[in-house]
Amino acid sequence: MSIFQMTKTVIRNLTGGPATRQYPAVPARRCPLTRGHVTIDPSTCRSCGLCSRRCPCEAIRIDKEEKVWEIDRMRCIACGDCVEGCPFGSLTMEPEYLPPVVEQCAAERHIITYVKPEKPEKKPAEESTQEEGAGESA
Amino acid sequence: MPERIIVPFGPQHPVLPEPIHVDLVLEDEKVVEAIPSIGYIHRGLEQLVQKREYTEYVYVAERICGICSFIHALCYSQGVEHIMGIEVPDRARYLRTIWSECSRLHSHLLWLGLFADSMGFENLFMRSWQLRESVLDVLEDTTGGRVIQGTCKVGGVRRDIGQEKLDEMHRELDPFEQKCRDLGDVFLNDETVKYRLQGLGVITKDEAYALGATGPTARGSGVAMDHRETGYAAYGDLGFKPVVETAGDCYARCAVRVKEVYASIDIIRRAIEEMPEGPIDVKVKGTPDGEYFSRAEQPRGEVVHYLRGDGSKHLARARIRTPTLANIPPLVKMLPGAQLADVPVVVLSIDPCISCTER
C-alpha cells in the first residue's frame, strides 16, 4: 500500500537524524575541482595578455606600462578559461569561494615584474632574432 | 450568470521561483480564461553573441538557464561544430551524455520537490531535494560547479572523468535508484497525490500537438516526441525510448518526469559501462561560416539554437527557442476549467523556466 511507503519514509526521517550539515560546526563540503577564485603568481607572469584576451567577461586587465595585472572580482565568473590558457602556469584556480561583499569593490591589483618588449615594427627579417634576444634577457 | 473578475497571478507568487504573470478571468472560483504575459527578466543574451567570440559564447549560453545550463552549452557547441565541420571524439560525446543526464536528474528532482510543495506536501518536497543534493555533489566532483558546470566547449569537453570516479559513480547508482524508486512510488501511488492531480489541467493529444507542446508536457498527453531519439551526443549508441503517458493531466506529466528519472539513471549506467577511451577534445581552427538549427532535449522539452556565422570570429546571429516558450500556449489551454486553488499546480506542471524563456 502506498500510504505505508510514505509512513516508512517519515519514520526513517524521524530516526535518521538531519540530512543537512550543521554548517558552522561542521565545515562545508569541499572538492578539489571546485572553481572558487583565480589567483596569480606575479613573479612568473610574463604579461603576454592571453588571459585578458580569453576572458569572456573582460574581468582581467593588463597594463604593461604600469606593470599591473588587475582582476575585477565582481565581473569574474570563475570559468577557468584564463587558467587553462596561461602558457606560464602563473594562474591557478583555488577551490575556496571568496567571502561575500556588500559594496562594489575596486579591481584587485597585482604588480608584475616582467614586461614583454614590443615587437619592432617593419623589420620582418630580424623579428625572430629579436624575439630570441628578448627571451634570454628575461 | 456570475460576475467575472480578473485575478492577477504572479509575477511574484510564493509557488513561482521565477516571474511569469498570468491574468486569470474567474467566474466565482473557476478559471474561464488565462492571459499570460512575460518579459520581466529579459537580459539580451542573444545580442551578446555579436560581442563575444564564438568560443567564449559557450559560457554565456550556459548561463541562459540555471538548471539546464549544461544542455544549453551542449546545444550551442553542437551547432558551431556542425557549421565548422568538427567531429567530436567519442569519449567527449559520452561525457556530454552523462552530464546531460545528471542535469536532467537534478532538474526533475528539483521540479518534483517544487511540485510537491505546490500541492502542500512539504515532506515530499524535502525528500526530493535531499536526493537532488547527491546529484549536485556528483556534478561538483566531476566538473567543479554545482549548477554551472562550464565543462562543455566547442570541439569537445574541458574535463575528463577518471576511471576511479566513474567506477564510484557506477557503484552509487544502484542505491540512488532505489531511493528514487521509493520517492517515485509516493508520487505515483499515493492516494492524496492522485486525488489532487488526476483530471486536473487536461490537454488532449491533438491539442498538445497542435499547440506545439514539447517535452514532458507533450509526452504526458501521448505525443511520443523526444529529441534524444534522433541520437545526438551518445544517445544514438546507447539506444533510447521516450517515456509516454496518455492521460494528459497533471498526474500524467508528473508520472512522465518520475519515469524519466529512472530512464536517466539507466542511460548514465550504460554510458559509464560503454565509455570509450581516447581524447576528449579536438583543436578548433578557423571561424564559423554558415548557419544551423541545433536542437537538444532539455528536461523541459526541446531547445533550438539557431546560429549564423559570417566567417568572422563573432557569430552574426543567435536565436534561442526554449521549451517553456513553446509550453505557454498549452498552459493557456489547460487553465480554463481549473479552480483558482489548483492554478499553481497546473502552472507548475509545465515546469516553467522563465529565465530560459526570456534569455
Image: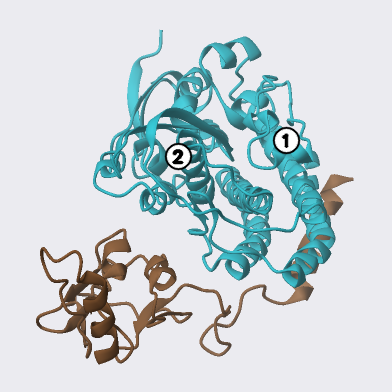
Q: Between B253 and A79, which is closer to the camera in this rendering?
A: A79
Q: Between A118 and B255, which is closer to the camera in this rendering?
A: A118
Q: Between A56 and B127, which is closer to the camera in this rendering?
A: A56
Q: Is mark 2 in CB contact (under 8 Å) with mark 1?
A: no
* Label 2: chain letter: B
Task: Please provide percent x and percent y for residue B105.
Answer: 66, 50
Question: What is the secondary structure assignment of the residue under circle 1?
Answer: helix
Looking at numbered disc 2 in the image, what kind of residue is underneath it?
A: Val
Q: Is residue A138 visible?
A: no
Which residue has dot 2 on it? B80
Q: Is residue B33 visible?
A: yes
Residue at mark 2 to residue at mark 1: CA–CA distance: 20 Å
Q: Is residue B180 left or right of residue B328?
A: right
Question: What is the secondary structure assignment of the residue under circle 2?
Answer: helix
Please name the color used to draw chain B.
cyan
Discs 2 and 1 share one subunit: yes
User: Which residue is depicted at the point 55% across and 53% down?
Assistant: B282
Task: Please provide percent x and percent y for residue B56.
Answer: 36, 53
Q: Is residue B266 left or right of residue B309?
A: right
Q: Is residue B309 left or right of residue B173?
A: left
Please determine whether, in this image, residue B89 is positioned above or below residue B235.
below
Which residue has dot 1 on it? B236
